[in-house]
């Protein structure tokens, strides 16, 4: 009856009083959780949270249309809810006329199915595709949302489109709000991500590397990575499983090893990561220039390590390919790479992990008949 009044009444004061009553019920320690579960059968979760905070705000939200990462709500949605509640109230009223003591029970499988939300992937109360299109959106509970994304990715052990989409959302979140990465170690997500990368198909390894790219700029995450058993081994294995993972893994190595964490370099020596990275420098067919630049920077950082740098230097000194790369400047290759499959900047409107647009430099000289060259020839003739 209260939901019917809140949705259908034309008197603002009555609607606000009804919303206040529902808010009081939600705050009750005894029946509040049950009331919340019932309301979630009818309303998107954001409405229920708004009811707990402010009845006036909840009514204002209910009366307007929304399309954002946390709420998809239209005139059609509102009309469907009001009609559903009105019909349910009418049936219950007729039952009460027959027996005033009749109990109202909601079917266990009941949910109002809104066409606006049909087929939408929702994680942690957030519409994932909408969030990917609006990664700068400030979600109400970013920490809980991040944890829900990590857990959902790791639930899809065979990879697939859902895992790709959720991983894209997680990367978008960590890129737009890098401060969240500071909480990743304490929440225990990193060791689980490493195991997920190790125990599942190649696609899962690539997804894990994409996520690692977004958190290895954080000192705490890199230290946690160094303290995770066999983390470097599993990163290297993921890179070996597919050529598309090489560029992503190279960026992980670049970001992680430039943090100067000795135990991480020790892990790298144990699994001969140095030898593998040198092999990438030798492979002109499968290793793009941008990935080689990342590899060179990672190796240079490793040889400066205070604990194991001399061992890295000894390995590099015996490499012919390193001699041709160690003195080159690679900064130019780190801008706007063409490598597909990893994130180098903010997520675009399409919502996939993409590199930025490449600046194309002509590989041929300007035409001889250009006005500039003509002027030069005239000066030379003089």
Image: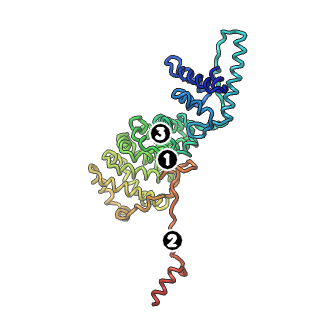
Decide which of 143, 39 is in the foreground and name it: 39
Residue placed under numbered mark 2 in the picture = 363
How packed mark 2 is, by other alpha carbons closer than 10 Å (few <14, some 14-19, many 20 or more), is few
Quadrant location of residue 126?
top right
From the top left corner, tell me how far across and down residue 315 is, in percent: 32, 56
43 to 167, vertically: above or below: above
Residue placed under numbered mark 3 in the picture = 196
Answer yes or no: is residue 251 visible.
yes
What color scheme is it?
rainbow
Disc 3/disc 1 C-alpha distance (Å)? 11 Å
Q: Which residue appears at 29% of the width and 54% of the height? A: 304
Question: If the image is split into quadrants, where does the N terminus sit?
Answer: top right
The answer to whether the residues at label 2 and label 3 have Cβ atoms under 8 Å apart is no
215 to 22, vertically: above or below: below
Decide which of 69, 284 is in the foreground and name it: 69
Left or right: 6, with 322 as reference point:
right
The answer to whether the residues at label 1 and label 2 have Cβ atoms under 8 Å apart is no
Label disc, if present, on residue 36 of the rendered structure: none
Q: Earlier in the sequence, mark 2 or mark 3?
A: 3
How packed mark 3 is, by other alpha carbons closer than 10 Å (few <14, some 14-19, many 20 or more), is many
Residue placed under numbered mark 1 in the picture = 206
Q: Which residue appears at 37% of the width and 56% of the height? A: 297
From the top left corner, tell me how far across and down residue 261 is, in percent: 32, 47
């Amino acid at each position: 009856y209260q939901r019917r009044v809140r949705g259908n009444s034309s008197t603002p004061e009555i609607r606000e009083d009804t919303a206040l009553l529902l808010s009081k019920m939600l705050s009750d320690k005894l029946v509040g959780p049950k009331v919340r579960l019932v309301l979630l059968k009818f309303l998107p979760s954001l409405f229920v949270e708004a009811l707990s905070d402010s009845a006036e705000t909840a009514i204002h939200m209910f009366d307007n249309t929304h399309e954002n990462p946390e709420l998809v709500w239209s005139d059609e949605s509102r009309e469907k809810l009001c009609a559903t509640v009105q019909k349910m109230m009418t049936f219950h009223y007729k039952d009460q006329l027959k027996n005033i003591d009749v109990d109202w029970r909601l079917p266990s499988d009941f949910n109002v199915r809104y066409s606006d939300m049909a087929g939408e992937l929702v994680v942690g109360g957030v519409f994932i595709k909408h969030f990917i299109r609006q990664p700068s959106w400030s979600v109400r509970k970013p920490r809980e949302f991040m944890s829900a994304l990590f857990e959902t990715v790791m639930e899809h052990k065979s990879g697939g489109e859902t895992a790709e989409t959720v991983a894209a959302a997680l990367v978008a979140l960590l890129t737009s709000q890098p401060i969240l990465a500071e909480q990743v170690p304490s929440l225990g997500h990193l060791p689980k991500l490493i195991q997920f990368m190790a125990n599942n198909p190649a696609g899962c390894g690539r997804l894990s590397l994409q996520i690692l790219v977004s958190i290895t700029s954080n000192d705490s995450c890199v230290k946690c990575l160094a303290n995770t058993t066999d983390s470097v081994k599993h990163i290297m294995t993921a890179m070996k499983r597919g050529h598309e993972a090489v560029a992503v893994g190279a960026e992980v190595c670049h970001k992680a090893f430039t943090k100067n964490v000795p135990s991480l370099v020790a892990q790298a020596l144990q699994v001969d990561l140095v030898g593998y990275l040198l092999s990438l420098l030798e492979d002109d067919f499968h290793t793009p220039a941008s990935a080689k630049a990342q590899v060179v920077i990672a190796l240079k950082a490793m040889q400066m390590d205070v604990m194991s740098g001399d061992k890295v230097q000894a390995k590099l000194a015996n490499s012919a390919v390193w001699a041709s790369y160690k003195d080159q400047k690679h900064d130019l290759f780190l801008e706007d790479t063409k490598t597909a499959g990893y994130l180098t900047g903010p997520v675009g409107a399409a919502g996939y992990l993409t590199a930025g647009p490449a600046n194309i430099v002509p590989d041929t000289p300007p035409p001889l008949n250009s006005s500039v060259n003509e002027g030069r020839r005239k000066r030379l003739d003089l």
